[in-house]
Every structure is written in structure tokens, then in C-alpha cells.
Amino acid sequence: MSTKAARQMRARRAEIASIASEDAVLDRVRQVRKVQAGAEADLFFLAIEIAQRSPVTEECGAWSCHTDLALGVSYCDSAANWFAAVTGFSTDAAQAMLLEALEVAERLPLLYGRVLDGRTRAHTARLVAEQTLGLTVEAARFVDVQVAAAGAIRGRYAIKGLVREAMITHMPDQYADLQRAQADPRRADVHIGTDGTGRIDAIVSTFAALDLEQSLAFGAAQLKAAGSGEVLDARRSLTFEGIIAATHHPAPGPAGRLRPDQRATRPAGPADPGDPAGTARPGTGGGGAGLHEQHEQHGRHSRHRRRCGHGCGRCSRSDSR
């Protein structure tokens, strides 16, 4: 910023700071907003004029024009470079403003009429145009009618709802393709082979993938340090098998006993070596640890009965069971 511009900016700040009362400050805010709205409308109309005066022609290719003709409206994108240079916008922002202004003027006549009447701000109209650029003429017309009938634009999400309804009605095939493209891509497929191996194919979050990669690299390095002669891919696969096995057989707690949360999820059955008859209660672990806990509870209860003389409610409840 030049010295002159800096002096002007400081003088403007000092002038605003010298305003006497809060009411005067609010009046100044109203005046500035009116000026801002007028300047915004002027820039919007200038963008329309520039886009309409820059049609796509056969000569555009000679100037490396890359205008997207798949959209409902188009202009020679070389105009965006000049518009960006004059306004100070980025090239992407200049292109967006030219496209959206042209969309409002040419494909959303009812909304454009509201802008000309001063009932809708240019910025709000651009929010609608941003969503209708990829629609067909019929779908864009549907959104235009709905917005005009509502009398006010309730926000970006309301506009997206109208666009979705328009696509369902007038562009069902494109809407179905869009739904498939926006579907959650995460999945996990397991393919069992006939040679004693299986293949796992999954799409997970980036963080989960990074964690898994670190775990596989660390496990493969540990196996190599332990003397494994397998190749790297085999050691990574063995590490992965260990991770899977750990989810089915959690590590025991202190003194070889399972934690309560592990006992609740571990199924009991005849295959448990600590309970060959399959008589362990659910939730006790189904093995020696569960039986040991039952014996401890039985012993505590027997000692209590000897001390209390079988007269307390606790023993009565136990006897009733």
C-alpha cells in the first residue's frame, strides 16, 4: 500500500472514531450498507455485460479458451482474466461471478426480475445460480418458479432442496448417477479362496488406513528381528492375521483372569477346555476363570451363612433361588 493510500485509510479510521454517539454510528452503518448494496448490484450488472459481450466463437480456440460448454450458459473465459485483473479477484472467483451473473440473466428470468426490482440482492441471486448451472432448462425453470413463489430465499440448504426436487422431476437419470457418486464409499469385502488363503478388500477412513499401515510395518519389522525368513509381504500378512486374531481372543487381565467386559463378550461352549460339559454360565468366560469365580462366590456365601445364622434377608433370597 502506498503512503498516500495509508494516509487516507488512517484518516478514514480517525473520522469514524470521532463520531459522537452510538446512534450516529448506527446511522453511518445504514448509509454504508446502502452504498455497499448499490456497488454490489453495479458489479453484478457489469459482470452480466462483460459475459454477454464475450460470446464463445470459433476464434476462441486460437486464444486457448477453455470454456466449459457443458453448463447452461457460457462465455469466452479470456474475459475472466481481464475481469479478475480489474476487480482484484482470483481467476476462479471471477469465472464464478461471470457464470452466475449470466445464469441469472439468461435462465432465471423471474429471479432476475426480482433483482431488477430491488427485492432480491445480487449476492442472494448468485446463490441460486450457483446450484442451477448444471441443470437442464426445464429443471432451472422449475427452481426459478419455486424461488419466485416463495417470495424469499431461505438459505443455501433450501436452495439445494429445490434443486434436488427439480432433478428428481426433470433429470431422474442424472439424479440417480449423482446419488451413486455421493454414496458412502466405505466397505469391507472378504473373499475366501480354495487354497487355504483369503483376500480382504476394504475402503476405510484415511486415519484408519494410516494406523493399519503403521501396525503392519511395525509387525513385519518385529517378525524380521525375531528371525523370520519370510518376505516382507508375507510378514505383513502374518501381522494382519495377528491383528484379526487379537479381536477374537483379547489379552487376559492380571493373574490370567479376563476383565469383566471380556467375560461378557466371550461365548461359553463345550469347546472351552475349562468347561468340557458346556455348563458354564453365560458371561463367566466359559473356562477355568469362570468356574473359579463361581467357587469363590460360593465360598463367600457359605462363610456368611455360618456367621449370620441363616437369619438375614440375603440368605433367604439365596435359599429361595
Image (tube, helix red, strand yellow):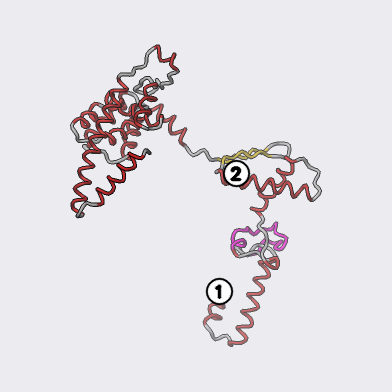
Q: Position of residue 18 (x, y in %)?
A: 23, 52
- The correct choice, above or below, for 46 with respect to 16 in the image is above
Q: Is residue 268 magenta?
A: yes
Say which residue label 1 marks: 321
- The correct choice, above or below, for 2 with respect to 75 in the image is below
Q: Amino acid at mark 2?
A: Ala
Structural distance between the alpha carbons of marks 2 and 1:
52 Å
Q: Residue drawn at (65%, 57%), measured in percent from left and top?
A: 250
Say which residue label 2 marks: 209
- The correct choice, above or below, for 130 with respect to 265 in the image is above
| Location of the N terminus (image quadrant) | top left
Q: Is residue 317 magenta?
A: no
| Lateral position of residue 135 relative to residue 246, left or right | left
Mark 1: give few (<14), some (14-19) or many (20+) Cα within 10 Å: few
Which of 177 and 206 lies nearest the eye of the viewer? 206
| Lateral position of residue 292 relative to residue 204, left or right | right
Q: Amino acid at mark 1?
A: Arg
